[in-house]
Structures are given as structure tokens and as C-alpha cells.
Image: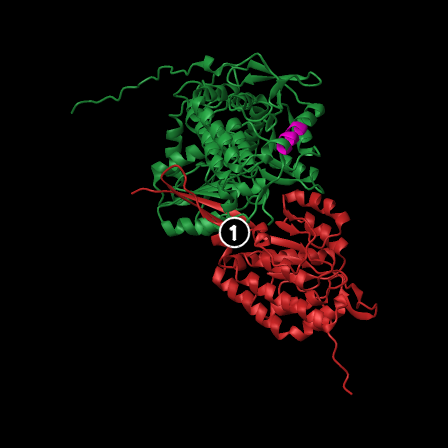
Amino acid sequence: MRLDVRKTYKLSIGGAFPRSESGRSYEVSDHKGGFLANFSQASRKDVRDAVVAARKAFPGWSGATAYNRGQVLYRVAEMLEGRRDQFVAEVGASEGLATRKASREVDAAIDRWVWYAGWSDKFAQVSGSSNPVSGAYFDFSVPEPTGVVAAIAPQESSLLGLISVVAPIIVSGNTCVIVASEQRPMPAITLSEVVTTSDVPGGVVNVLSGFTREMAPVLAAHLDVNAIDLAGAAPADVADLQAAAADNLKRVVTPRAEDWHVDPDPGRILAFTETKTVWHPMGV
Amino acid sequence: MIDLVTPTWEYAPAPEARDLANIKPSYGLFIDGEFVDPRDGQVFKTVDPSSEEVLAEVATAGPADVDAAVRAAREAYDDTWSKLSGRERGKYVFRLARLMQERARELAVLESVDNGKPIKETRDVDVPLAAAHFFYHAGWADKLQWAGLGPDPKPLGVAGQVIPWNFPLLMLAWKVAPALACGNTVVLKPAETTPLTALRFAEICQQADLPSGVVNILTGAGETGAAVVGHDGIDKVAFTGSTAVGKQIQRQIAGTKKKVTLELGGKAANIIFDDAAMDQAVEGIVNGIFFNQGHVCCAGSRLLVQENVHDEVIDRLKRRLGTLRLGDPLDKNTDIGAINSSEQLERITSLVATGEQEGAESWQPDCVLPERGYWFRPTVFTKVEQTHTIAQEEIFGPVLSVLTFRTAEEAVQKANNTPYGLSAGVWTEKGSRILWMAQRLRAGVVWANTFNRFDPTSPFGGYKESGFGREGGRHGLAAYLQTGW
């Protein structure tokens, strides 16, 4: 009988896997209330470090060609597929799903990632435009990534919901700081390992486990975060987080009743883009 | 050799007829299709900033008036406007566009008198663009499902709109035209110092037989605006104005279902490379910061000049500024009109003083200021550093801060070194450099070898703390629709 080697679940910041600088951890139970694992309880300092890492990664990731980003993200889907059994076990343990149901969640999550990866070189064609202005000018509009985006991952749907939030943020070239589901963080931490080993540059996806109520206000008020997705914020906290976000006029996506199984539209991609319009005179 | 002496040609006065403005002594609020007195009887005066003469008494809308206007807008939405087909709705908006064109001269004079801006700008820019905005959006009313914003876009309901004083009628058009075309009804508050063209637009709504309550105009100051934004019956807030007020609005509506778009301040870089076509670039600099007395959120208020052409550009610029004519806004030869209000004049004066205290070097052309009214000479600051207040804060006046750069990378870095991100200008004859720069400038509008161009088909709006949402084009429609996205 061989004793298994257990994993230490850590944060993911800038392509590295640190414990919380605070040294804190918290216990996460499986759906039956048994011990699942200890997770790092990220501090405000960890949040700020993650924002710094995300900002540093932004020029490179947003400057990559759309084709390149699409390939890198597709690579992530390949790696997700390779870890499929692990995700099934983790989603099953986290969400209390039997293997068949957990498999369906994981399959949907991988397929969702592929769907978003394919948008990388298409959303600009859908949401851009050539503008027929009244004058001798060439005038066009293109969507560009907003910058550093924070996301409070859905609390219930630990992988499908998570991926449905993360993928649309990064596909356009944003970098992000993700607050994992507080009580179901395991698939998020594994996703961070997948992303980090899939040609995604360090700092593009930073994942923090810990207490949502501790981290969300810091992200909402952070002056170097350009937008925030409040998908997993407690309804009672949304108004305060929205108000804090006004400090630097963040773009805010507020939570709504979401069935993550329903095929999405490109709305979440476009929510984290800015339309840039360029004018140039025509003449000889 | 014949000694040719260039004669000096004096300009004769060329005033537009002031009586075309046709201003009444007092105006009520426009609620439910009628002009009514304010419930609590409060009024304020609007003045001609070029003479400080009172033009008219205007009502201050209090909470009860706001409530009545929102209720009228809601009833109009429920009972008539949302039941009309897009085609019929569009025809009303076309009527508004045509009426504005018919009354263009009157509107231009009225706008010049109330705002202080030169008649050639109201005549050639503000009013024609405002009419064009209605004309463009009218055509969208029955085509929204093809706008690429989802298969079944729906109106939001009642829009509360608060607009600034720098382009009163044009900003009204940017707000009202897409709102109506998308099927919403509106409660609009024009700026305190420039209410008259909005009230004239109310008369145009009457002439168009627009159903009562579809457009409501509430005059007043900041408190009235806050009451409109905060009213429970508002589904959508659209604001153009300062970044500070934009943040207040975002806080005020936190936790509500209200959809919001904010078009806020800017501190745009206008970047001149050494290979730029210099005559055009200098015109672009002048247009960028001295158009509309610099009361432009997207004004090119920071001039970034490549170091090796700094002296040449500044010499040419000074020469050109010496030819600008400052004075009577109604004179057709006037380039620079009056500052809109005494408050704004104080703000500009104080920021310019700060610029001098902090060590920048100021220069003004030698022009005579009229004795009455609010005036400020075009001002150029050289030796400006990035940390100077005048390089960071929006002045909203005819004041240019000049900085230099050596490389394109440095120009990008300096241009983006601001919390704002509304617009930017690039002047170079090299096409690939234009596109390289355009890609890296974090701003919603990039003007390459031009500046301060606007068009109803062209989306306008900011990055970062210049706000969010777009106005104009297909993108601007999203601000007034439930797209399902």
C-alpha cells in the first residue's frame, strides 16, 4: 500500500505559486463536510501584488497578435483536456456531484474555453466598424482590451462558471486577477496550474484563494484595476463594491442570475473592451 | 526693384443679427409637452458671457418638477412611444432633424449669445452637427435589429440626461437623438449657464408634434441634475461633464439597475513628429486647443513636440496665434469668443497662475480684451514638466502646455501618463508610425493629421477616467438598448 503524495494548494501570482505573504491558510471542506484541503488565505498585500503582476503582463499580452492569443488559449484547452480526470474529481468533491454529472461540467467547461479561444481574432470584426463620416476622412473603430480586470469568480459553479468568467476577459488581451470561489477554490487553483504551463505569459491570469469579502473591496477600490466582474460577489455587497469602483471609474459587470450551462453570447468579451476610433484625412 | 509694402487690411465689423435669437424675458420648464412654471417658483438668470447682460430668467426645477417630468416621460413611454413602430418613431426624429436645419441660423445666433462661442463655430459646427446627429439616428429607429447588438434589442425606458455648457445644443443632440431612435423617452437637464437652445429645442418638439412627454427639459443647476440622476423612475443615466461629477454619479447609482454612460474630462496629448507637415500641424494645434475657447473635453491641451523641431513649431504657433481675432462672438470674423462664465474664467486664471508659480513659461499674443464680459487670451506654456499641475489637470480653457519628446516610445509614455484617456492627436507623414502610435495611445479617439473632428457615424468616448460608453455610430446605440448581452 503506497501513501499518496498530497498537493499544497497555493496562490498564482505572476506565473509563480506563492503561499499568501500573510502565511494564513483556511480549511476547505468537501460537500459532505469532510476535510478537503487547506488553501492559502490571500491578504490585501497579495491582492496588490497580483494587480502589479497583471499590469506588468498587460503590454505583452495585449500586444500579441489575435492569432497568437487564440493559439495560446487553445493550448490551454488541450491541457485542460489532459487533466480532465483531475478536474472531474475536484469538481465532484467541490460541488458534490457524482462522476457523471461532474464529467458533464468539465466537458462543458473545456468546450466553453475552446469557444472563447476562437473569438480572439473575430470579436474585433464583429464589434469594430468603418465609419462613413461626412468628409474626406478614413475613420474606423476597433475594440481594445480595457486593461487589468478583476473578477470575483462564481461561488457555486467552481469550474464552468469560473471559465465562463476568465476566458472572455483574457481573450481580448486583458490581464486579470481572479478571486476563486471561497468554499470551492480547488478547480481554480488547478486551472492556474494549467494556464501557467500553457504558454500563457506569467501575470496574465492571477488566481487568489481566500475570503471574498476581504479581497473584493480591495480590488473594487484599486486605482490600477480598470474593470471588475462581480459575478461571485454576495448580493448584499454589490452596491458597496460598485460605489468603491467609482474611485477610478471602473467598468463594472454586475451579477445576474446566470445559468452557466446556457451557450453564451459575446457580451462578456465586449464588456471588457474599449472602442477606439481613429481618423485620418484622405488626400493626395 | 519695386519696394512692395504689404498693406495692413483692417477687418470691418461683420456682426450677425442679434435679434434673430428672439429671446423671451422668461422661460418655464418643458414638461409633458407644455411650458410650465416651476412648482416652488425658483428662477435663475442666464447671461451673455460676452457682455454680462442678462438674457432671460429661467426656471429652477425642484424635486417636485423632476418627479412630474419623470412621470410624464414614463407615461409617454408606456402609452405612446413604446407602442409606435420603429418606422413611425424614426419619422418623428427625421422631423426634428429637418426643423433644426430650417431654424439653423436662429439656433446658431442663440447658441453664440448664450454660450459666448463664435458664430462661425455655431453656424458651421454646432448646429449642422446637431441636426446631422438627429438625421443619422432617425434612420436607425427601424433597423435596430441589424445593428449587431443582439437579435432583439429593446429600449430601456426613461433616460435621465445631464449635459454640459460647452456644446449645449450639440450635446443635447448626442443624448436625445439616440435615446429617441432607440425607443426611450427622456428627461434632459441642460447646463445652468446655457439653457436657451435646449428650451428652443423644446419648441421644435412642439412644432414636430412629438407626443407629449417624450422629451422633457428641466433647467436648473447641479441639484436638479442630481435629482434627475437619483430619481427612481429613471432607467438610464447619460452624463457629459467633469470626471469628479462622473464619479459622484457612479457612486449615486451604485446598487440600482440604472444603466449609465459617462463622457468626462480629458487631457489629450497632441503629438508632433519632426516629419509632420508643419503648416497643417500648427493649424491642428490651434484647432486642438483654441477651438471653442478650449472648452472641449477632448481638447489637445498637452502639446508633445519632438525635441528637434520644438523651436520651429513654437515660433510658427506664436505667429499664427498673433493672427487670431478675439472678441464679439456674433462677429463672423471672430476666432476666439468669450469664456462661458465668471466661474470658469476664475478657474482658468487660477490654473494659469499655478503654471507660472510652478516654473513653466507663459506666452500670450498681444490682443485687446473687451472691457465687459469674460475673456481670456490664448496662452501657451513652454518648459512644462509632466509633474506640473497644468500638465495634469484639465483646464478647460484656451491654455496649451508644451512638452517635448525624443522617441516615439517616449511620446507614447508621456501621452498615456494621465488618468484620462479621451483623445489624442498624432502628426507625422509616416503611415506606419501613425498606426503604431494609434495602437498604443490609450484614448477613445485618435486623430491622425487632424484634430477635433466629430461625426454622428463615428463613436466617441473615453478610456480610463474619461468615462465609459460611446456616443455616435453603431456603438452609441448600445447605450440606449437592452441588448441581452
Determine which residue is flagged by label 1: A144
Q: Nearer the viewer, residue B415 or A267?
A: A267
Question: Is residue A163 found left or right of B405 in the rendered image?
Answer: right
Question: Is residue A36 found left or right of B449 in the rendered image?
Answer: right
Question: Is residue B343 found left or right of A90 in the rendered image?
Answer: left
**Chain A: what color?**
red
Does residue B338 sit above or below A101 in this rendering? above
Chain identity of mark 1:
A
Q: Nearer the viewer, residue B385 or A34?
A: A34
Q: Position of residue A146 (x, y in %)?
A: 57, 51
Q: Residue at x 64, y 74 (%)?
A: A83
Q: Residue at x 51, y 66 (%)?
A: A71
Toward the right, the furthest residue is A33
Q: Which chain is green?
A: B
Q: Position of residue A68 (x, y in %)?
A: 49, 64
The image quarter in which residue A208 lies: bottom right
